[in-house]
Amino acid sequence: MTAQHLLYKMTWEETRKAVEQQRVVIIPVGAIEQHGPHMPVDTDNLIAVSLCEEACKRRPDLLACAMHIPYGYNAHNMEFPGTVHIRQHVFMDYVFDVCASYAKHGFNYILLINAHGSNAHLCEGIARQVSMQTSARCGWLMWNRLTDEVFESMRESDYPGGTGHACEMEASMYLAIDPDNIDQSKAVKELTWTVSEYWYKDTAGNGPLSYTSWHHEFSRTGIAGDPTVATAAKGQAMIETFCDRLPLLAENFRSIVDQPRFRDLPIERMS
């Protein structure tokens, strides 16, 4: 039986029905990149796909999950083997075309759910481009923006710097989703990005300066944070929170209705 929450498992007739239902298209966006000695390079994809497909499975009346975007912008991690890097303009053109295809078929609302930090600025640009150049409205978010509150209530790692990359947050997610493929015996604490009051990176909040350097300049292991305090229970709590909140966000997003273009509004003359 067809999985009614997965667009890539639907026939074209079932897809047309999903359009008629005005379901919100969810596109997981990930990457293949190093995540330290303890986590596989599929971490971002595993998190994005698992979260999005589970949330859509719970609300197939509202959400429909598309095939994920597996590769991302990753120049800064290329010193670590296994990382795959896609040039920015190639990534943006590709993801735009994916979104534009769904818009062409009649889907009016599309959400990019990103799990790779260096895709963030690109997803922002793509969402704007889709909204301006197609018939669809497109938004984006980092997955953890829906779970930050619950994670911070459980957090044990230092702030700032304890949750940056291959850290307490991501390792907890991997332990909850696929515990057989993460080796916590190789997890180490390496606070790499806490370098000044102006430039530091942490999922709970960054410094005022945005700057991306070669990852190997600041991290011997590839880790930025403390994955040693990760637990599956923390990951499961984030999964449940995400699956509760994404439908609420999507319903709110879908409530946006078309307004007349400014050029079509009547001119009101001042008396």
Image (spheres, rainbow, N blue to C red):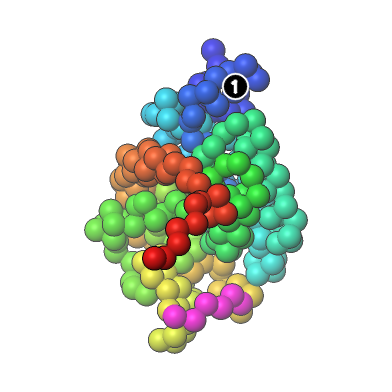
Residue 9 vertical position relative to residue 55 in the rendered view, above or below: above
Residue 269, x across and y down, in percent? 45, 62
User: In this rendering, does residue 221 appear at all?
Assistant: yes
Residue 237 on the magenta segment: no
Residue visible at 56% across and 78% down in the picture: 211
Q: Residue 260 at what x, y percent from top left?
A: 50, 47
Q: Residue at x 68, y 55 (%)?
A: 92
Residue at the far front in the pictured view: 271
Q: Secondary structure at mark 1?
A: helix
Quarter location, residue 188: bottom left
Q: Position of residue 246 (x, y in %)?
A: 39, 42
| Image position of 33 (left or right of 61) | right
**Magenta residues: mostly which secondary structure?**
loop
Residue 192: percent from the left, percent from the top? 49, 76
Along the line of sight, the residue nearer the viewer: 6 or 190: 6
Comparing 268 with 188, the one in front is 268
Using a 10 Å C-alpha cutoff, classify the residue at mark 1 as few (fewer than 14 neighbours), some (14 to 19) or many (20 or more): some
Residue 185 seen by the camera = no
